[in-house]
Amino acid sequence: MPRWKAESDPEFKQVIPYVIVEHRPTGRIYMTTRIGGDERLLGQNSIGLGGHMDEGESVLDTLYRELEEEVGLHRDEITDAALCGFLSSTLTEVDHVHLGLIYHTSTDREDISCLEKDKLMGDWFTVKQLQEARKAGHMESWSAICFDSLLRGEAAE
């Protein structure tokens, strides 16, 4: 199905690899803020990087391609890419047409930044700082769900 049609058809779920990137030495998580692109997500924070699969692409190929396109992380700079779960939500219009495959990965590289500067800005954040963003209601729905499921307990440490 063409993407333009899939974006408005909740009967067809688009699979999105959605990866949480941790800076292994410090335990910080990379979080972005949407400043362009999909108007439905503008101004929202995301702890996940990722995007749509291209025809014939595997989930992992998409995950690695998106990390390279979004923040310049190469496959050999990423360790422990682990599938944490699946995410299906109907909280927002965007959620209705997507199915997330949630991954957690880590890197020793600290000098990453958003390469799609017209769409995203980002930085490393402690789990405590993410907890503050979550409480303030600044996280997009998938990030809030992932934070609550995977990271919330770490904020107390």
Image (cartoon, helix red, strand yellow):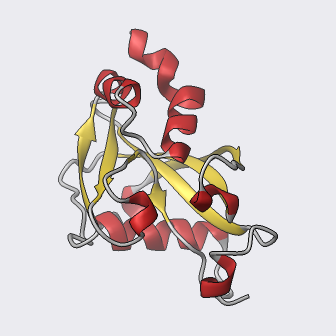
Judge left or right: residue 128 versus residue 47: left
Quadrant of the image containing the C terminus: top left
Which residue extends farthest right?
11
Q: Nearer the viewer, residue 46 or 110?
A: 46
How many marks overall? 0
- List x then y, in percent, for residue 76: 40, 63
Res 75 seen here: no
Res 18 seen here: yes
Which residue extends farthest left?
111
Up-down: is 82 above or below 61? Answer: above
Residue 56 occupies which quadrant of the picture?
A: bottom right
Up-down: is 124 above or below 10? Answer: above
Q: Residue at x 49, y 42 (%)?
A: 143
- List x then y, in percent, for residue 125: 27, 35
Up-down: is 137 above or below 74? Answer: above
Up-down: is 64 above or below 140? Answer: below
- List x then y, in percent, for residue 132: 32, 24
Q: Residue at x 42, y 59 (%)?
A: 41
- List x then y, in percent, for residue 34: 32, 58
Judge left or right: residue 7 versus residue 118: right
Q: Residue at x 50, y 52 (%)?
A: 19
Q: Nearer the viewer, residue 62 or 129?
A: 129
Quadrant of the image containing the N terminus: bottom right
Residue 38 occupies which quadrant of the picture?
A: bottom left
Q: Nearer the viewer, residue 53 or 38?
A: 38
Residue 69 occupies which quadrant of the picture?
A: bottom left
Which residue extends farthest top?
156
Q: Nearer the viewer, residue 133 or 82?
A: 133
Judge left or right: residue 57 versus residue 22: right
